[in-house]
Amino acid sequence: MTDLHLTGHRATETERSAIDAALAASGIDPVLSVETDRLVRGGLHRAAERRHALLPALHALHNATGWISHGGINYIAERLGVPPAEGFGVASFYEMFRMEDPGHTDDVVHVCVDGACQLAGADGVIVGLESAGRHAHRSPCLGQCERAPATFTQGNQGRPDHVEADALSRSPVIPQQGDPHLRILRRIGKIDPGSLDDYVSFGGYKALARAFALGSEGIIDAIGTAGLKGRGGAAFPTAVKWRGVRDAPGETKWVVINADESEPGTFKDRHLMELDPFAIVEASTIAAFATGAQKGFIYVRGEYPLATRRLQRAIDQARHAGFLGQRIARSSFAFDLEIRRGAGAYICGEETALFESLAGFRGEPRQKPPFPTTHGLFHQPTAINNPETLVNVLDIVTDGGEAYRAIGSPDSTGSRLFCLSGHVARPGLYEHDFGATLGDVIDAAGGISGDLRAVLLGGAAGSFVGPDALDLPLTFEGARAAGVSLGSGAVMVFNTSSDFSAVVARIAEFFRNESCGQCVPCRVGVVRQHELLLRSAGRSMDRTLIDDIDRAMKDASICGLGHTASTAVASAIDLGLIGASP
């Protein structure tokens, strides 16, 4: 049994009501879990079953009062059987949670200071807010790069969260809207994202019917024939992942949708969640049917309130119509989905860190192996994909793997979403068949505003390339040959007016802030890298030291954050965007 060591602080009625409502929505019964400071009801096993509701409870507490109080933590600890120290440890891990009473009732405005928003005048936005007496907070990328500068207002005292961005670039939502060649984006702008009837009238749920006819093996074979690879950055073959989960021992299996889209410069999954949410629900159901999963979670980044609301509405409608729950579409198959909100932690985009966060722990990556196919969420077999990857499954199941494979290149099949931001005429989300060049993608966005100096491919974890890379084919093999990565599809364009010293220093600061601190090479390396850039102010730096830091993080970090934290910095030096000494 575990001592809870509760303090004398007690939650207010407002806090208790908010926490109770969140726990009830997560299926937690109202009976308290403690008696005289000892866990007695249900034992440790019962506490473990409840712990996954910790993050929703923290969100509810924070929204009710604007901060995480000692009394609120104690009440959550009583309800879930979690030691209060661990509750504080989890809460303090996340950017969105304040751990001290702010002493005011105003909402906090998070102002993005990364990439596109940095170029678009984020510092001026902060000055303006502070001059008006508002509470501004410098924030990492908010996933609104095409509408920079962006802010996220975090409500409290029951008020909702909302996002604001440059109104001049809000319409159309997709610059290619109406293009008959679109596949992934073809429904956007043509259906009401809040209407299941609209989705069905546009061909929705035909893929699920076809999936039932194909069976698990037929679905996975079609995806294998199609050559579908993950669109989150790792480019892992989807069929291999799904077959691994299906064949893994164990009766309980999971589907997890990684919608914690936090890579600076990336906003593709936000569009899919906000504007085509039923496609994600349908594709998730197919993934569950193919892998044998009974339950799924959609982990949405906390700064996406509209996406969260629309996904929840889609889930509710699908369940009411018989497309989720028991006997889906009158079959014997049962599957259900639940949404979990992240709380501002870039590292939770790493799959094992996401599993830890979902389970109610700090979002720290695990060592691999074992891999998620056998030891994923709750250390059980789990298929984890991002929304873009899943939406591609619909066409593969409906039209067949061969038809899908005919698009793109031999090693990069199908089409791909690219997030254009920065100094382009029409920032936004674009879909192109694999094989389009970097120049093609920029031209489709109206071309460069000013004279091109560099493009950041793949976000903060990616690489800068120069004007001579415009002929680079944007395929997995093309990027690999050029020594770069497509990452999650970010294409951030910089003209000759850009202050690269400030841009690269901010990238280094981003990694310094977002490292979870679990492993020494990353925890120390990102700090030393940022300090070096600040000392040099982008001028002469010790390149040998930069390379040593990079090598140490690549060789010994647990996860991809440490492996890629110096990639953009090194490429900026190579291109002469910032200075370095031998």
Image (cartoon, helix red, strand yellow):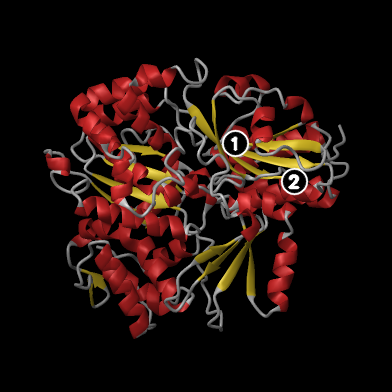
In this view of the protein, which residue sits in the foreground, 171 or 87?
171
Q: Where is residue 27 in the image (x, y as percent from the top left)?
A: 22, 62
- How busy is the neighbourhood of tag 2: few (under 14 within 10 Å), some, or many (20 plus)? many
Quarter that holds the N terminus: bottom left
Task: Quadrant for residue 228, please give it.
Answer: top left
In this view of the protein, which residue sits in the foreground, 494 or 169?
169
| Label 1 vs 2, first from the N-terminus | 2
Dot 2 amino acid type: Val
Q: What element carries label 2?
A: helix
> Is residue 527 shown above or below 35?
above
**Residue at the disc numbered 1:** 563
**Residue at the disc numbered 2:** 504
Residue 342 seen in the figure: no
| Lateral position of residue 554 relative to residue 232, left or right | right
Q: Which residue is drawn at 20% across and 72% down?
A: 30
- How busy is the neighbourhood of tag 1: few (under 14 within 10 Å), some, or many (20 plus)? many
| Lateral position of residue 346 relative to residue 543, left or right | left
Q: Residue at x 36, y 75 (%)?
A: 74
Dot 1 amino acid type: His
Q: Position of residue 157 (x, y in %)?
A: 44, 79
Quarter that holds the C terminus: top right
Viewer-side label of 1, 2: 2
Q: Residue 321 has which mark?
A: none
